[in-house]
C-alpha cells in the first residue's frame, strides 16, 4: 500500500525518545516521510496501540522502520510518529 504524509506530528516525548534511544532526530524522520511521493507502507495492528502504518525507508543510508499512527485529520494525510528503528544491513 502507498500512503501520503502531508504533515507528521512528533510529540516532544517521542522526539526525545528517538534521539536518545535510536540516535535519530525528528528532522531526519520528517525528511524521509513528509511529502514523499509513493511512500510504501504496510498495516499492522498492535493489541495495545491499535492500527498503525509501518514504513520501510532509509535514514543516513541505513535501512529503517518508521511507525506511524493515523490521526483524526479529515483528509487522512496527517500522521503521528510512534517510533523509528534503524536496522542492520
Image (cartoon, rainbow, N blue to C red):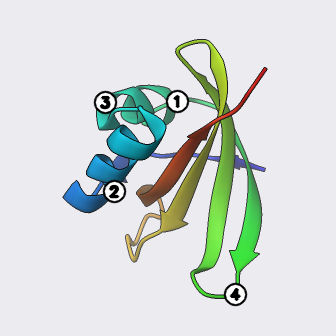
Q: Which residue is mark 3?
A: 27
x then y, percent, for residue 66 = 58, 45
Which is nearer the N-term, disc 1 or disc 4? 1
SS for dot 3: helix
Q: Is any part of residue 16 visible from this angle?
A: yes
Tally the marks. Answer: 4
The picture quadrant where one finds residue 11 is bottom left
x then y, percent, for residue 38 = 67, 33
Q: Which residue is mark 4?
A: 47
User: Is disc 4 surrounded by few (<14), some (14 to 19) or many (20+) residues within 10 Å?
Assistant: few
Q: Are marks 3 and 4 in contact (CB under 8 Å)?
A: no
Label 2 and label 4: CA atoms lie apart by: 20 Å
Q: Are marks 1 and 3 in contact (CB under 8 Å)?
A: no
The picture quadrant where one finds residue 63 is top right
Per the rendering, the mark at residue 14 is 2
The picture quadrant where one finds residue 65 is top right
Q: Which residue is mark 1?
A: 36
Q: Are marks 2 and 3 in contact (CB under 8 Å)?
A: no
Which is nearer the N-term, disc 2 or disc 4? 2
Label 3 and label 4: CA atoms lie apart by: 29 Å
Q: What residue is shown at x 26% (from left), y 60% (from top)?
A: 13
User: Is disc 1 surrounded by few (<14), some (14 to 19) or many (20+) residues within 10 Å?
Assistant: some
Amino acid at each position: 500500500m502507498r500512503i501520503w504524509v502531508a504533515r507528521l506530528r512528533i510529540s516532544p516525548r517521542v522526539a526525545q525518545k528517538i534521539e536518545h534511544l535510536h540516535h535519530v532526530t525528528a528532522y531526519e524522520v520528517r525528511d524521509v516521510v513528509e511529502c514523499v511521493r509513493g511512500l510504501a507502507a504496510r498495516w499492522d495492528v498492535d493489541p495495545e496501540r491499535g492500527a498503525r502504518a509501518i514504513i520501510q525507508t532509509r535514514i543516513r543510508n541505513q535501512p529503517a522502520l518508521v511507525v506511524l499512527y493515523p490521526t483524526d485529520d479529515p483528509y487522512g494525510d496527517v500522521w503521528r510518529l510512534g517510533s523509528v528503528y534503524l536496522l542492520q544491513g
